[in-house]
Image (cartoon, rainbow, N blue to C red):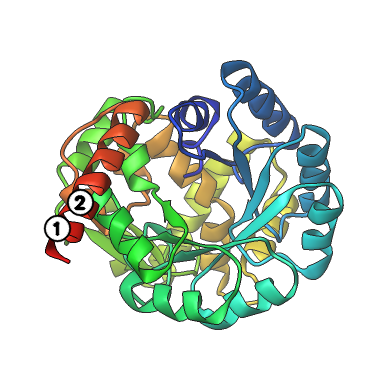
């Protein structure tokens, strides 16, 4: 949700009764501070901030959340004990995202207040296990609240997740496709035109399985050989370096950090370093043919752009109707 879940969408979600979470990985520390304060100006409802646990300034970001009294810190990668303790000491709840039962067990043992479980249907970085198999595993394994993600877009999904034992659901693609989302209209149309088979999980973007909309650009990445991939990576890296005002050594350091300990070739390392630029091309510049668009498979089931308030009201009504029908059956 980088470049998507900013002040506008998060405030609209929380004000409508949901719990918005800022995607801060593509923000500087100062931009994050400004975003938090803008959300506060728009709504007094609680919200959270997602932090990359491996970011060099993760402790500083947590300190910012503490000082600004943000309710929750979510983590795209599992935080270590020290980060969880730092949040707890400052009164900030923690909710790491996990894709396996053992990861949920580990962070719960370390003191996480909740876990967000994303099944393979979800967009962005994702795993191979579908939500319907992963969710009950995790619910049975941990005593903290479990939030389900991956494949949810309506009230029926909410009821299903609750039936599995989840405390609620998280949705990325569904909130991206709202009128409150800052994504360019032409990009939203690409999402609305997608089918349930219109996404692909690729490791060619940053070395980690990443579910995105299938486009000619992504197909080219998938077909590229080592030499073509290196040339393309250098070209994209050069553009990102100029946009981000980074030196080549700084860019390479960012790429090494993005490896997450994996043995990636330099072409892949450069792609990992400039992944934010590829997201920006689509989400900010409105140029889907030159960037990547993270997407869950539910993109193929979505055909409208409601406001966050309309969406949440509709989901709750659908959930109530489904529960009433189930009660009648019983």
Residue 227 coordinates in the image, percent (x, y)? 43, 69
Residue, x 55% and y 59% (percent of image)? 272
Residue 258 coordinates in the image, percent (x, y)? 63, 63
Which of the 4 image quadrants contains residue 255?
Answer: bottom right
* Above or below, comparing residue 210 to residue 66 in the picture: below
Residue hosting label 1: 328
Q: Is residue 24 visible?
A: no
Residue hosting label 2: 324
Q: Residues within 10 Å of mark 1 (few under 14, many from 20)?
A: few
**Looking at the figure, which quarter contains the C terminus?**
bottom left
Along the line of sight, the residue nearer the viewer: 50 or 212? 50
Which element carries disc 2, helix, strand or loop? Answer: helix
Residue 149 coordinates in the image, percent (x, y)? 41, 59
Give the label on residue 255, or none: none
Residue 81 left/right relative to 166: right
Q: Are marks 2 and 1 in contact (CB under 8 Å)?
A: yes
Along the line of sight, the residue nearer the viewer: 29 or 152? 152
Residue 90 left/right relative to 29: right
Kindly report the distance in space between the C-alpha atoms of the residues bearing marks 2 and 1.
6 Å
Residue 297 left/right relative to 206: left
* Above or below, comparing residue 147 to residue 264 in the picture: above
Residue, x 62% and y 64% (percent of image)? 77
* Above or below, comparing residue 226 to residue 321 in the picture: below
Which element carries disc 1, helix, strand or loop? Answer: helix
Q: Is residue 110 visible?
A: yes
Residue, x 58% and y 76% (percent of image)? 142
Residue 5 coordinates in the image, percent (x, y)? 49, 37
Residue located farthest toward the top when viewing the structure as drawn: 41
Q: Residues within 10 Å of mark 2 (few under 14, many from 20)?
A: few
Total tally of numbered discs in the picture:
2
Residue, x 59% and y 34% (percent of image)? 243
């Amino acid at each position: 949700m980088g470049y998507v879940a900013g002040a506008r969408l998060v405030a609209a979600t929380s004000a409508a009764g949901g719990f918005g979470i800022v995607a801060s990985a593509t923000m500087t520390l100062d931009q994050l501070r400004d975003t938090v304060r803008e959300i506060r100006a728009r709504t007094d409802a609680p919200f959270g901030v997602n932090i990359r646990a491996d970011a060099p300034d993760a402790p500083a970001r947590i300190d910012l959340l503490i000082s600004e009294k943000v309710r929750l810190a979510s983590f795209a990668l599992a935080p270590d004990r020290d980060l969880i303790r730092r949040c707890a000491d400052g009164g900030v709840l923690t909710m790491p995202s996990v894709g396996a039962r053992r990861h949920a067990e580990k962070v719960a043992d370390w003191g996480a207040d909740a876990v967000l479980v994303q099944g393979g249907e979800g967009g962005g970085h994702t795993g191979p296990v579908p939500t319907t198999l992963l969710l009950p595993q995790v619910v049975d394994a941990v005593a903290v609240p479990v939030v389900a993600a991956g494949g949810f877009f309506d009230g029926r999904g909410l009821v299903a997740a609750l039936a599995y034992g989840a405390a609620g659901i998280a949705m990325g693609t569904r909130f991206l496709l709202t009128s409150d989302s800052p994504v360019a209209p032409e990009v939203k149309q690409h999402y609305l035109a997608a089918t349930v088979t219109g996404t692909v999980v690729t490791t060619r973007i940053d070395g980690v399985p990443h579910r995105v909309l299938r486009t000619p650009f992504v197909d080219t990445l998938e077909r590229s050989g080592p030499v073509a991939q290196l040339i393309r990576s250098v070209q994209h890296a050069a553009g990102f370096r100029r946009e981000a005002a980074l030196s080549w050594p700084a860019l390479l350091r960012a790429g090494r950090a993005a490896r997450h300990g994996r043995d990636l070739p330099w072409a892949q390392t450069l792609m990992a370093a400039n992944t934010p630029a590829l997201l920006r091309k689509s989400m900010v510049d409105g140029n889907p043919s030159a960037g990547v668009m993270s997407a869950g498979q539910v993109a193929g089931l979505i055909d409208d752009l409601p406001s966050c308030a309309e969406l949440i009201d509709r989901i709750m009504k659908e959930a109530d109707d489904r529960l009433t029908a189930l009660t009648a059956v019983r």
